[in-house]
Amino acid sequence: MLNLANRTFVSYHGGSGGDMFTASCNGIFLNTGQDYGAGNNIAVVNHPYSIKKYDDQIRSGAVTLEQVCAPLSYAYLSTHLFDELPNNRISIVVRDPDVFDSVINRQLWLQRLRIAVDSGTFFKLIQNLCIGQQFDKAAHVWFDFAYKRSKQDMLHRINSAGQQLNFDRLFNSDFVDSLASQGWTHQIDCLHHNHQYWLPKQTAFTSTQVKQQISHKLSTMNWSQTHGVIWYENN
């Protein structure tokens, strides 16, 4: 069985800052456009060192963390998982409410929307609004639900034991200095380079813009589907 003690998991809630940080931890310098992909026409860090696409399968027990990590050679792996991880994790926290909003707005702008077909209240509400072509109203409901859940998740991270790094200065030029003041020294030159490269590429979104984007995505989804998961397919 794979020894997970040889890996460090960078657990963060959302936004490409976590991937930029993880690239730096692995000594990967972001130098060219090849380091970026396009998500809704904005720059997102490519992340071969991420296990995020397996998060739901790990949560459900369909695969194990060991199975997902086995083919990957990187020492640092990024994920949105938190409670499912062993103690060798670095939890990224954001306490500043304005920075939190910036991170969540960017995450929700990029998010590949999906929702499981079930008998739950949230699904039925979203489905009925979308079938009635009230996509803007559905987007408000979706945004408010996602924002509230994100806030709860962040508070859980903040109040949990284990190593934390505060990313309140993520969108400022002194971000690396702020991490150094918290005792972070690993690959600090690489991190400084990558943050300078990453920062100008970040686009700020208002909650209104994000809701408009969610509305557009919802309008393209198949709300007549009767089972499985309804996806927005065009990221």
Image (cartoon, helix red, strand yellow):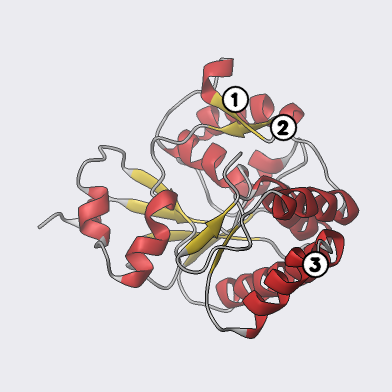
Q: Is residue 29 visible?
A: yes
Q: Are marks 2 and 1 in contact (CB under 8 Å)?
A: no
Label 3 crowd bin: few (<14), some (14–19), many (20+), radius 10 Å? few
**Residue name at image x 58 percent, y 17 percent:** 33
Residue 234 percent across, percent down from the top left: 61, 39
| Between discs 3 and 1, the one toward the N terminus | 3
Calculate the distance from the C-alpha at mark 2 to the C-alpha at mark 3.
41 Å
Work out whether mark 2 precedes mark 1 in sequence or the reverse, and give the earlier one: 1
* Residue, disc 2: 199
Which mark is first along the chain, 3 or 2? 3
Which circle, 2 or 3, is nearer the viewer?
Answer: 3
Q: Residue at x 68, y 27 (%)?
A: 196
* Residue at the spot of label 3: 132
Neighbour class for label 1 at 10 Å: few (<14), some, many (≥20)?
A: some
Q: Quadrant of the N terminus?
A: bottom left
The residue pinned by badge 1 equals: 193
The amino acid on which the numbered mark 3 sits, given as a three-letter code, is Gly
Is 185 in front, or is 78? 78
Which residue ends up furthest to the top in the rendered image? Answer: 32
Q: CA distance from mark 3 to mark 1?
A: 49 Å
State which mark lies toward you, 2 or 1: 2
Residue pictured at 65% horizontal, 84% vertical: 121
